[in-house]
Amino acid sequence: MVDWQMIYKQAKEWVVEAGDLIKKSLENELTIETKRNAKDLVTNVDKEIETFFYHKIQSSFAEHRIIGEESKGHDISDLSGIVWIIDPIDGTMNFVNQGRFFAISVGIYEEGIGKIGITYDVTRDEMFHCLSGNGFYMDDKRINTLKPFKMDEALIAVNSGLMMENRSFDYKIIHKLIRDARGSRHLGTATIQLAYVAAGILDCYFSTKISPWDIAAGRVFLNEVGGELTNFKGQELEVLERTSIIASKPGFHEIFFRDYLREK
Ligand code: IPD
Ligand code: CA
Ligand code: CA
């Protein structure tokens, strides 16, 4: 029998330890490289933190598998057993340019089912965490089931690419949505925006090109508090696919697909 409480406690401790390493690294000069394009950044710290988790997990849970954004487990194509899905720094551009507003994201899945989610906002020292079935927490505060979405009170989060002409979505629909809502935000970290939707701090979040490590923790949170999560077609997401997402309070998807997409 898997001791999930023990894994949960251990994972949170490692995340805090990794957070301390990242905070210390802010005093040093970063080595910055680019990946897919000039805006897709990776630093020596992203790589070091992924390696930190890799060694910790390997030494304590040798049978668990690991998928990390920077290099680990990219050949994994099935979710049998227990799989840790890790983004060592989500919001690397914020990390590099601002030195704040980035997070460590850890999702732990068993046979493809999300069991544990952890999103640690390092510089705010704020941890969102959940062991499935045991409640979603912001630090020690338990978050209740989400209230229904209300357009006139809503804050809509979008990634900036969706605000301008793009290949995957008609940006005018997003503009209309933002006009109808109370306001919009784009924060530069998927995992924090997903945690915020689950905590009721944001009302919905739209993004394209989201990878498994961006969403592995958030999916566990949303599931726990009755949030909604689909791709832009309204379909359920596969854990290992790179995809578009709409995450929201309950009721948003019905309004969006009925009243906004139909007008297109
Ligand atoms: C990125 C951030 C960003 C989102 C991108 C992600 P990274 O992750 O979460 O907010 O819009 O899609 O790739 O590269 O900082 O780990
Ligand atoms: Ca990321
Ligand atoms: Ca990252």
Image (tube, helix red, strand yellow):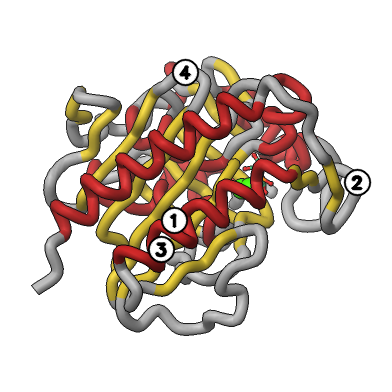
Q: Which residue is labeled 2 in the image? A: 38
Which secondary structure, mark 1?
helix
Q: Nearer the viewer, mark 3 or mark 2?
A: 3
The residue that appears at 42% across and 51% down in the rendered structure is 106
Mark 2 is on which residue type? Ala
Tell me the tag on residue 124.
4
The residue that appears at 73% across and 52% down in the rendered structure is 169
* Residue 64 vs residue 194, the one in the foreground: 64
Q: Which residue is labeled 1 in the image? A: 216
Neighbour class for label 4 at 10 Å: few (<14), some, many (≥20)?
Answer: few
- The reply to whether residue 41 is in sight is yes
Q: Which residue is labeled 3 in the image? A: 84
Disc 3 to disc 2, how far (Cα)?
Answer: 28 Å
Give the quarter of the image for residue 1: bottom left
Q: Nearer the viewer, mark 4 or mark 2?
A: 4
Disc 3 to disc 1, how far (Cα)?
Answer: 9 Å
The residue that appears at 65% across and 65% down in the rendered structure is 71
User: Which is more N-terminal, label 1 or label 2?
Assistant: 2
User: Which is more N-terminal, label 4 or label 1?
Assistant: 4
Q: Nearer the viewer, mark 3 or mark 1?
A: 3
User: Which is more N-terminal, label 2 or label 4?
Assistant: 2
Q: With respect to residue 205, does 147 lie above or below?
A: above
Disc 1 to disc 4, how far (Cα)?
Answer: 21 Å
Which secondary structure, mark 2?
loop
Mark 3 is on which residue type? Trp
Mark 4 is on which residue type? Arg
Tell me the tag on residue 257.
none
Disc 2 to disc 1, how far (Cα)?
Answer: 25 Å
